[in-house]
Amino acid sequence: MVRGGDEYDPANFLPGAPGRHREYSNIGAALAGYIVERATGQRLDAWTRQHVFAPLRMDHTAWLLSQVPQHARLYAVLDGVAAPILPYALVTYPDGGVRTSVSDLSRFFAALLDGGQYRGARILAPELAAEMLRFQYAGAAIPDNVDPAKVNSGIFWSTKLETTLVGHGGSDPGLETVMLYDPKAGVGLILFTNTAPDETGMKAYIAMVQLLRERGLQLKAQTRTVR
């Protein structure tokens, strides 16, 4: 990636100074995974298994296909027909290649929202968890192409659905995923599908997200009533 080198491509770089322009970057997440490996001396899959997955009892979570005993069948929609596709791996796997379940991921989500711990297992110091959740676009740290009233970001997450929810999602062939939190209501949701929806399907996907949020609000109200 050195200027003039064989792998150099100016399209991989922004013309703006660091922190002055927002651009979504999968490669940035892959780079963060590489930084973890350089800092710890361990492969990312081994380090996260030891320090995140095992403490939280995320027993069905792994980065590599060889470490996953069960895998949902994936489907790609082609000309309106859902065709099965084989499980696959990503070269830049830290940007979205972890394989998990809703049950497992909910443990990580709960830990992140509760100061870095879940049921006595701590994976982050409270100040680090707070920094991950903090809105980064404030004061002098507002990129030139961002209106914080319309979109804001933490570390690897951002506001969604007209800023009423915060979290992150992603899609690849055969899947669509999202993990969101309603900070005002104190309700979180996770939704996985094993098909990447087309435009019509995405409308249904968003409707399911809204239904899950409403169901979460109902369950929370019932819990308060019982108490």
Image (spheres, helix red, strand yellow):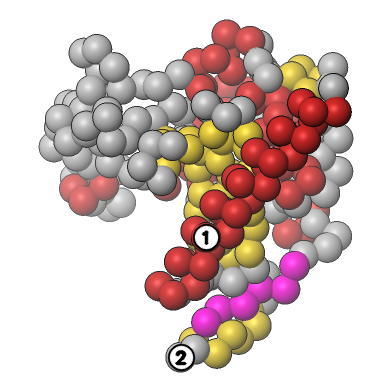
Which of the two residues, 23 or 181, is positioned nearer the viewer here?
181
Instruction: Name the residue at 57% across, 8% down.
Output: 127
- Left or right? Give the position of 146 relative to 96: left
When asked about the image quadrant of residue 71, the answer is bottom right
Rendered view: 143 above or below 176: above
Label drawn at residue 207: 1
Judged from the image, the secondary structure of the residue bearing numbered disc 2 is loop
Rendered view: 158 above or below 227: below
Magenta range is: 72-77
Instruction: Name the residue at 55% across, 90% down.
Output: 81
Task: State the CA–CA distance, disc 2 to disc 1.
Answer: 23 Å
Q: Main secondary structure of the magenta part?
A: strand
How would you rate the neighbour count of disc 2 (Cα within 10 Å): few for under 14, some for 14-19, many for 20 or more?
A: few
Q: Amino acid at mark 2?
A: Asp
- Left or right? Give the position of 94 relative to 226: left
Q: Amino acid at mark 1?
A: Ala
The percent position of residue 97, horizontal first and vertical second, equals 60, 52
Rendered view: 206 above or below 45: below
How would you rate the neighbour count of disc 1 (Cα within 10 Å): few for under 14, some for 14-19, many for 20 or more?
A: few
The residue identified by callout 2 is 79
Inspect this view and state whether residue 162 appears: yes
218 drawn magenta: no
The percent position of residue 8, horizontal first and vertical second, equals 25, 48
